[in-house]
Image (cartoon, rainbow, N blue to C red):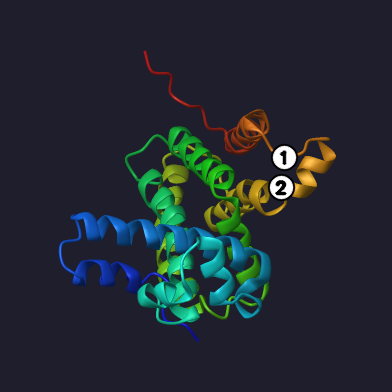
Amino acid sequence: MLGKPTRKPAARNQVASDGNANGPAGAIRRRNVEKILKAAESVFAKKGFAGASTAEIARKAGVPKANLHYYFRTKQELYASVLDAILEVWLDALDQEIQPEADPATALSNYIARKMAASQRSPEPSRLWAIEVIGGGRHVQPFLRNRLRRLVKEKTTVIEGWIAAGKLKPVNPTHLLFMIWAMTQTYADFAAQIAAVLDKKSLDDAVFATGSETIRSLILNGLGARQKIRL
């Protein structure tokens, strides 16, 4: 089993340990790592962990296989780093937006917008995450049962506070978050299905804008939340 995917990726440690991370050599390393991670997202999303090979990822990244293993010693380390990047984007959005002092309608609207933006900009990481979890989440169980569980419990308390204050209709906060995850990530994970039904080659800005507004309306109207108008 892999270690926690939220640990500091090996490649980042490598960049920091090879001298001046802000100099020309550090810039080259950062570019190489970015290319490798991007290629890995794509290959892992299509083939999963077992079907992907570091040789194929290196070819897609345009770097020698030896260079890939310089930054990521094993396929497991590379996979963990890819998952780490996905999780940080999602957790950052949840942690920043769902705060006790925030206006609930604004916070939920912003959270939905950020999740939809992630689905639009980076669909392959979302698909990779779906493949991993559908397969049982073997590589991410420590994260799911520890960090994610703690964060969801914390944000559940925030939402319960909004409900107790009369700012939202009663709802199960945990399942509310499940619903938001499902509605926003489907635009990445099932993009081909949505595009086919809409008779489009791919999902464009208009689809994501309409999807975001529909999700926002369903959630806010269902919770009786009204977004404050800034004057």
Q: Position of residue 156 (x, y in %)?
A: 45, 56
Asked if marks 2 and 1 touch (Cβ < 8 Å), the reply is yes
Residue at x 18%, y 55% (from the top left corner): 23
**Counting other residues with Cα less than 10 Å from the Cα at mark 2, is it few (<14), some (14-19), or many (20 or more)?**
some
State the SS at label 1.
Answer: loop
Q: Is residue 39 above or below residue 158?
A: below
Q: Position of residue 27 (x, y in %)?
A: 27, 55
Residue picked out by circle 1? 202
**Is 90 or 54 nearer to us in this picture?**
54
At label 1, which amino acid type do we have?
Ser
* Left or right side of 129 for 28: left
State the SS at label 2.
Answer: helix
Task: Answer with the quarter of the image where residue 7 lies.
Answer: bottom left
* Left or right side of 119 for 72: left
Task: Point out the residue furthest to the left here.
Answer: 20
Q: Is residue 7 above or below residue 26?
A: below
**Is 127 or 105 nearer to us in this picture?**
127
Q: Position of residue 19 (x, y in %)?
A: 16, 67
* Left or right side of 3 for 15: left
**Counting other residues with Cα less than 10 Å from the Cα at mark 1, is it few (<14), some (14-19), or many (20 or more)?**
few
Q: What is the tally of numbered marks visible in this picture?
A: 2
**Is 62 or 69 nearer to us in this picture?**
62
Residue at x 43%, y 51% (from the top left corner): 94
Q: Position of residue 151 (x, y in %)?
A: 41, 62
Residue picked out by circle 2? 191
Query: Which one is in front in this view, the residue at disc 2 or the one at disc 1?
Result: 1
* Left or right side of 141 for 222: right
At label 2, which amino acid type do we have?
Ala
User: Disc 2 versus disc 1: distance between alpha carbons?
Assistant: 7 Å
Residue 231 marker: none
Task: Point out the residue furthest to the bottom here.
Answer: 1
Q: Earlier in the sequence, mark 2 or mark 1?
A: 2
